Structure formats: structure tokens, C-alpha cells
Amino acid sequence: MIEESKKYPKRKTWVFRIVLSLLIMSVIYAIFMFFITPSGPAQHKFERVKSDYVLMILQCIFGCIVIFLPSRVERRFHIDIPDIMEIIYFIFLFCAIYLGEVRNFYFRIPYWDLILHCFSAVMLGALGFVLVNFFNETDKLNIELSPFFVALFSFCFALASGAVWEIYEFVADSLLGTNMQKFITADGTILFGHEALADTMEDIIVDALGALVTTTIGYFHLRKLQRNRNQPYKLAR
């Protein structure tokens, strides 16, 4: 299964280069705009202020670092991440950072944030299955994991990754005065109490639902393979 998805090395390279180039150019653009943008609150809807460009710089630099994560993981741990999954990961960074932050889709496109969280939950759930395959194929561990444990691990991995991202957003907003958790609306209104928590809780709920759908489908697929092979399941190479 994994071998079949290792078909797109050239496409993966091109997508990687395009996304990385856009992120680097966005860093340069955001730094320039930071120095020429006047201080103070936004005067009209969708107007960018200095804190918006701080967030853009932070997110784009973060993207320039984590875009190398799949290749580093493959070399360090000798894990075969399918090319198609890496392409999806690069596209996710493009949608979340370039379109979301640089092009301001988070405010301009309704539910853009929730769509991306659902996308990331599905992607991380699938990545959980790849990680379990690595453990199953490691001779030193000598373990055979049941479909239920594989699905449970993948679900918890996706949900934990989403929670770590929410912590990152909270810390960035607290230290840098950014608006990653969207507690300030597009017209400058500051939310309080239950409304201020809505974005974070919606993100976590969507993460859970996306991961649940992915891991449930994966669970029944593994059960079917296990019955057909009449032996403890191992993901095919």
C-alpha cells in the first residue's frame, strides 16, 4: 500500500519548492509591510495592522521550518512516508499559512479555519497509521498490534497534535499580541467569555470528528484485511 503511493517524487519536489518559495517571499513582504504600516488599531474591516504582520512573519517562518519535517523524519527514523501524504502536507501548509494568513482567508472565507482543522485531523489520523506501521515492521520491538489499537493510537495522535497547535496559538497570542485564536473579529471587536473560547473549542471538536471518521474507516479496513489474511494485521510495505 505504501509502495504504491511512492510514485510522485517529481511532483512532491515541485510542490515543495513552490510552497517554500511562497513562504520565503511572504516573510520578506511581511517584514517590509511591518515597517511601513502605521501603529494603532484597524480603522476598517480587513485592514492589516502591525500585529497582523508579526503573525504573518511568525507563521511563514514556522512554515519554512516545518516544511522540512517529513524529510527529516524519514532520514532520522528510516520511516517511509508516502509521497502522496507529503504532497498533501505541503498543500496543507500552503492553505493554512499562505492562503490563511498571507491572503487573509481566515477572515475572508467563512469557516476556512474549521475546514483546515478537519483537513489536518484527517491527515494526522492517516499519519498515525503510518507510524504504527513503522512499529509493526521494527524487528527489535517484535509486536503485532490489533486494528483497534492502531485506530485508537491514530485517533489520539491526531487529537493530541491538534491540542498542541491550540497551545501554540495561545502562547503566540499572549506573548506577541497576535490574533491566532480569533478573539478579535475582522472589524476589531474584542470577544470575551464564552465567545472568546468558541474558536478554540470549535477547532478541537472538528479535530476530534475528523480524526474519528478517518480512524473508524481505517479500523474497518484493517479488520477486513485481518479476516482475509487470517493472521494479525501488518500494514503492507
Image (cartoon, rainbow, N blue to C red):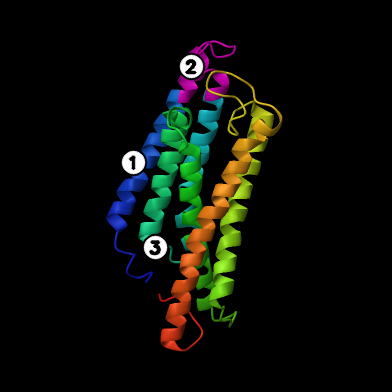
Q: Is residue 90 above or below residue 192?
A: below
Q: Amino acid at mark 3?
A: Pro
Taking the spot 60% from the left edge, 47% from the top edge, the residue there is: 204
Q: Secondary structure at mark 3?
A: loop
Quadrant including the N terminus = bottom left
Specify the quadrant of the image occupied by residue 201: top right
Q: Quadrant of residue 185?
A: top right
219 magenta-colored: no
Q: In the structure shown, which secondary structural element does the residue marked by tag 2 occupy?
A: loop
Looking at the image, is mark 1 or mark 2 earlier in the sequence?
Answer: 1
Point out the residue furthest to the right here.
193
Please state if 228 lies on the left or on the right of 9 as rendered. Answer: right
Kind of residue indicated by mark 1:
Ile
The alpha-carbon separation of the residues under discs 1 and 2 comes to 27 Å
Label ID, residue 82: 3
Q: Which stretch appears magenta? A: 30-52
Which residue: 51% across, 54% down? Answer: 210
On residue 9, which mark appears?
none
Q: Tell me residue 41's x, y (percent).
A: 59, 13
